[in-house]
Amino acid sequence: MRADRILLAHGSGGTMMRELIEDVFMGRFTDPALLRMDDAASLEVSGGRIAMSTDTYVVQPVFFPGGDIGRLAVCGTVNDIATSGATPLYLTVGFVLEEGFAVEDLRRIVETMASSAEEAGVRIVTGDTKVVDRGHGDGVFVNTAGVGVLRDGVDLSGSNCEPGDKVLLSGTLGDHGIAVISVREGLAFSTDIVSDAAPLGKLTAAVLEAAPGVRCFRDPTRGGLSSTLNELATASGVSITVHETEVPVHDQVRGACEMLGYDVFQVANEGKMVAVVPAEEAEAALSAMRTAPYGEDAAIVGEVSQGPAGKVYVATGFGAKRIMDMLVGEQLPRIC
Amino acid sequence: MCLAIPARVKTINENNMAEVDIMGVSRHASLDLVPDAKEGDYVLVHAGFAIQVIDEEAAEENLRLLKELDILETEA
Amino acid sequence: MKHSTAFADPIVAKHLVDKIRETAVTPVKFMEVCGTHTVAIARNGLREVMPETITLLSGPGCPVCVTANPDIDTAIEIGRQPDVILTTFGDMIKVPGSRSSLQKEKAAGRDIRVVYSPLDALTTAEEHPDKHVVFLGVGFETTAPTIASAIQEAQRRGLENFSVHSVHKTVPEALRALVNDPEVQITGFILPGHVSAIIGLEPYRFLAEEYGVPSVIAGFEPVDVLQAVWMLSKQVAEGRAEVEIAYKRGVMPQGNPTAKMKIEQVFRPIDAEWRGIGVIPGTGLGIRQEYAQFDALERVPVTPEPPREIPGCQCGEVLRGITLPFECKLFGRGCTPEHPIGPCMVSSEGSCAAYYRYTDYGRGE
């Protein structure tokens, strides 16, 4: 196609839209189901239960150190499926493009999505495109929905946690949030930190294999570790305590959080997994994480206890305890 | 009221602006309020400005005094 | 050197706690006057390790919390003017005024932007020559010199579309108001380390000399705070009343003369209204005539609606240390970080927010 910017006509269902789909999307999303251009993809699913998830991605800026909205869109949904203990198989993708969005940028995003899907071992099998007037969309919004298959006997849930369980974290906290903030207008600082966006299906499969008693997985995205643990503590009616000194955090992430006044437990991650496992399986789960892709910095960071239901605590370096509270609204840079 | 963090002055540029390093993160900060700051100094940075040069010796001295507390402790 | 880790050493902290317990044998109330101290104490759970004899109170040290409704209402009204970009530190975005907040105004379509530094506001002004950029200048003496420097830089660059709505306040005279207040009974002050990095030791002398109240200038790491509490306990035990510096690496007795000079060049003392306390003469910083073109009150004059207070909100008493956050009838019942009624719950370092976030104290459940 010749246009270098998205036009309203590209969303109208006519020949220009066909051109966009064939050139930009089908040029890189080459799945056989997709190539048939039917309205629905018909797919093989082996016996068992289906896990489904959907997520919409609106990140600004669209391109950030270590990734882009496309990487998030694939990895985010893959990871949501993986948290249920299922093997992620198929993805749908829906684009809402703003009139004026650069076609070259769209090509970059499509490329990232295709390569991320290949890495994750998932197929992009069906899609949709819409175009909205200039000023009515932030460049591009992407929705993905995912389908995976759950083996029999796998029944993970955030409400399964029990006193005595250990809490594992697959790696360093805060990388994604800080990477995105570092290129936000007005806050720019330079750092080597890049987004950690990554597909974790292989990591969860490895942990499930090594520690079949695993209670649940959760990926600490928006709201950070704090939101995830507070949700788990509430769903299971237990208390969770995290040992501050055990939590892996890159120095530069710490530095950036100090500078802006951010709480690293509330900063978003896009390539990390929390696993709650029975105490006797914790070491096996940890080894499995550490040898799986993206899990090399995994650590046991805390434990579940009887305590007041729904409360999450941080045990500080000198034995004092404070509450790990959930994010309210946005984290903003502060002087106080 | 005063989130100010220690940062090392890496390079001083024109108009009193400097590149500072906070645990590996680089940002620019104004040295307008600390005209005597030199490259290599540690400064307290608040709202994009260095507000004071950190006295390294005083820091060491303070830590030394505090560490002696456990000597006093065991003597007591 | 890695200052943070050295001054957060748990072993040193433990020894300090032991010394404090040994020394603080009579009941005392120590007030910290710095929101950053409120957060440092809460986040590190320092209240739990204090002996029963020591009560740590939080005072009006959060410049966000003490910004009175009329000042916020004026900022909001400025933000409503056509072709104005209002820039602010993140701290102020959620603070409720009489009827609205900057966050609500932003949602309603006003151009309100959070910046990390007043210098970023200058950049915004340069990038938008067709708009007038106003910076909401909030903060104590730590922040005021940075705005003074930014104003002088704006002058140097010949910027015609930049001004500051100054609601800056100064600390020492507010301390005088606290010691003069019969309801407030403070044994000693933990003084703000970074305000003191600017103003030095002298402005606090009156506490010791006129009122016999001991005070210690403290840093913000856990060991810094504990060291200050220990030094205060010693003053009390030894019957002394002095102004001491615990935070020696960051505070010189003379403060920062360059910063002090810039504050004096750009600002002049005016009366200021402190939320919950009332007007404290001479504690505000107004922009001098020579810099009138950078004064938002001159460049974007507005008349907000008459201010009003929120019934039931006890921020005033909390700010003076008379009421503890969880003693406020609205704490956790109607006033939460998600739906704050008063600024003490909004500001990340407001006493109420710090209590709510970091401790279990009576969440109204």
Image (cartoon, coloured by chain):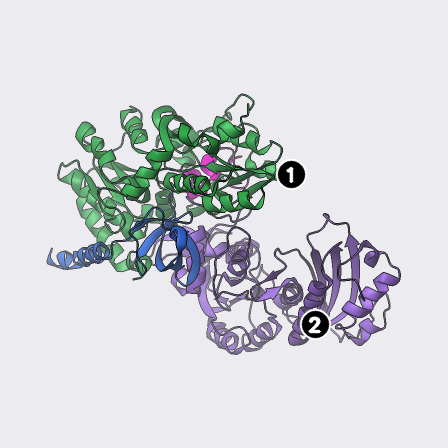
Chain colours: A purple, B blue, C green
Number of other residues with Cα within 10 Å of mark 1, as a class: few under 14, some 14 to 19, many 20 or more: few
Question: What segment is highlighted magenta in the picture?
Answer: C333-356
Asked whether, in this view, residue C364 is left or right of residue C6, the answer is: right
Of the residues shown, which amino acid type is indicated by label 1? Gly
Q: Which residue is mark 2?
A: A114
Residue C132 within the magenta-colored segment of the rendering? no
Q: Is residue A312 above or below residue C365?
A: below
Indicate which label's residue lies in the foreground, 1 or 2.
Answer: 1
A114 in relation to B22, above or below: below
The residue closer to the viewer here, C259 or A184, is: C259
Q: Residue A157, located in which quarter of the rendered image?
A: bottom right
- For label 1, the SS is loop
SS at mark 2 in the image: helix
Rendering coords of residue C154 (x, y %):
46, 41
Taking the image as drawn, is residue C249 in sight? Answer: yes
Q: In x, y percent, where is residue C45?
A: 35, 49
Whether residue C160 is situated above or below residue A76 in the rendered picture: above
Identify the residue under disc 1: C109
Give me the residue at 72% from left, 57% from top. A101
Q: Please indicate whether residue A98 sits to the left or right of residue C56 in the image.
A: right
> Can I make out residue A151 in this image?
no
